[in-house]
């Protein structure tokens, strides 16, 4: 009797809430579906171009020039109002910085909306006089992966530590000093270029760095509607924790701050990192080749092509998603592996990252600043002698102004 007297009011309360809860859930679901539809409609309405950049042979610019160019890619316009974002589905522009090897021929590319192509070309010329810049056909579209004639290995990277901890940058390698002699320079991009240049006929390897301007758009958990920036918040927390760890108690019982050199360097590195423009990023790479020439020997080279940017005391890259499994029982039929490969190939081709799902989960973006991006994507100087790195064979110039007409 007591159970019935308790169950009855509970059931009445549930039935009372259903007419309220169901419409709310339905409206929210429909709203999410509309936003997704509007966003897909907006993105499909845009035209995109692939720009190939060929640096000159006598090239002596430091990666600082690339950092200044990347700063120009910090574009936040286009999604200013809720109507823009939620009704029209507008999103701020993102770009793809790419290094690709076509049977050993190494080339640099930038993918963007067509409306921004002229702006990008002007910014490149501003930093790199003498480069060759032209729109080209998408090299990915030349590979018919569905034909079954190719084998591939793909992966996506994430940071191994919290975002505010920087990777080892060109400043740490001393490349910020133009006066450094060529024989003393250590360009961290060289191992990547050498690996890409070592591929043979029928082999291709592509590296793609998706970037968009990072904004203060994280949910502030302390407020109902407030926004915050976890990148900055996490940096402050890490620095605070380091300073707490560096405090010791002296003989008098007083707490004295005494940071080690390593702790001080770590704080300085974090402060320098978050002081620069940040970009939401995603990195993926693919090794694809004709089935009869595909070589597993190249897979470690692809996986480790970002290894030189890692630091034991700061940050590094690690694979998050790969088209492989550690144990056979993870994919008995092979269908999951086939699906993984198709998904990564299509994601690479679409230059998508921030909304495309992988196995039901949205890919985890991370944040790199302009200095870090310029480290992993810049044009090697003349000291990098990889013979298959495409360069402009001769310097171009304007005709003299006093030529007879």
Image (spheres, helix red, strand yellow):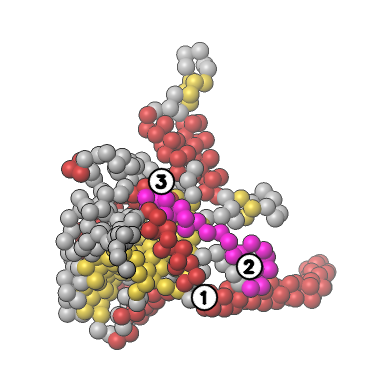
Which residue position holds label 1?
Answer: 46
- Answer above or below: position of 293 versus 283: below
Estimate the spatial distance between the alpha carbons at disc 1 and disc 2, rounded to whole Å.
15 Å
Say which residue appears at 30% left-offset and 49% top-offset: 61
At numbered mark 2, what does the secondary structure look like: helix, strand or loop? helix
Query: Is residue 67 in the magenta section?
Result: yes
Where's residue 297, x and y in %? 18, 66
Viewed as shown, does residue 255 lie left or right of 4? Answer: left
Q: Quadrant of the C terminus?
A: bottom left
Where's residue 402, x and y in %? 31, 59
Estimate the spatial distance between the alpha carbons at disc 3 and disc 1, rounded to whole Å.
34 Å
Start-end of magenta stretch: 65-88
Say which residue appears at 81% left-offset and 70% top-offset: 13
Viewed as shown, does residue 363 lie left or right of 4? Answer: left
Which residue position holds label 2?
Answer: 85
The disc, 3 or 1, on the residue closer to the chain's N-terminal end is 1
Mark 3 against mark 1, which lies toward the viewer?
1
The disc, 2 or 3, on the residue closer to the chain's N-terminal end is 2
């Amino acid at each position: 009797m007591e159970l019935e007297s308790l169950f009855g009011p509970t059931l009445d309360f549930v039935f009372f809430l259903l007419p309220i809860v169901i419409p709310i859930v339905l409206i929210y679901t429909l709203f999410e579906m509309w936003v997704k539809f509007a966003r897909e409609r907006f993105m499909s309405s845009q035209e995109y171009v692939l720009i190939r950049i060929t640096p000159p042979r006598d090239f002596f610019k430091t990666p600082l020039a690339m950092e200044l160019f990347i700063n120009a890619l910090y574009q936040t316009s286009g999604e200013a109002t809720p109507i823009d974002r939620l009704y029209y589905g507008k999103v701020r522009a993102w770009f793809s910085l790419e290094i690709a090897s076509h049977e050993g021929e190494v080339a640099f590319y930038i993918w963007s909306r067509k409306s921004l192509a002229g702006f990008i070309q002007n910014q490149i010329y501003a930093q790199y006089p003498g480069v060759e810049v032209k729109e080209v056909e998408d090299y990915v579209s030349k590979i018919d992966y569905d034909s079954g004639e190719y084998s591939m290995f793909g992966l996506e990277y994430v940071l191994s530590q919290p975002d505010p901890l920087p990777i080892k940058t060109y400043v740490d390698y001393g490349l910020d000093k133009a006066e450094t002699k060529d024989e003393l320079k250590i360009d961290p991009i060289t191992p990547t270029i050498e690996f890409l240049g070592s591929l043979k006929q029928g082999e291709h390897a592509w590296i793609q760095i998706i970037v968009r301007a990072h904004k203060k758009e994280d949910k502030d958990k302390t407020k109902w509607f407030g926004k915050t920036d976890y990148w900055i918040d996490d940096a402050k927390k890490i620095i605070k924790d380091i300073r707490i760890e560096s405090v010791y108690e002296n003989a008098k019982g007083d707490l004295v701050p005494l940071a080690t050199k390593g702790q001080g360097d770590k704080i300085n590195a974090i402060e320098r990192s978050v002081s620069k423009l940040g970009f939401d990023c995603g990195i993926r790479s693919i090794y694809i080749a004709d089935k009869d020439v595909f070589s597993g020997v190249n897979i470690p080279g692809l996986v480790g092509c970002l290894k030189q940017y890692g630091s034991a005391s700061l940050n590094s890259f690690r694979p998050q998603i790969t088209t492989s499994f550690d144990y056979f029982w993870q994919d008995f039929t092979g269908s999951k592996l086939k699906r993984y490969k198709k998904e990564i190939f299509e994601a690479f081709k679409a230059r998508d990252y921030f909304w495309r799902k992988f196995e039901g989960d949205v890919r985890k973006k991370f944040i790199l600043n302009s200095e870090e991006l310029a480290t992993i994507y810049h044009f090697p100087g003349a000291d990098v002698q990889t013979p298959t790195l495409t360069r402009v064979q001769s310097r171009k110039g304007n005709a003299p102004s006093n030529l007879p007409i």
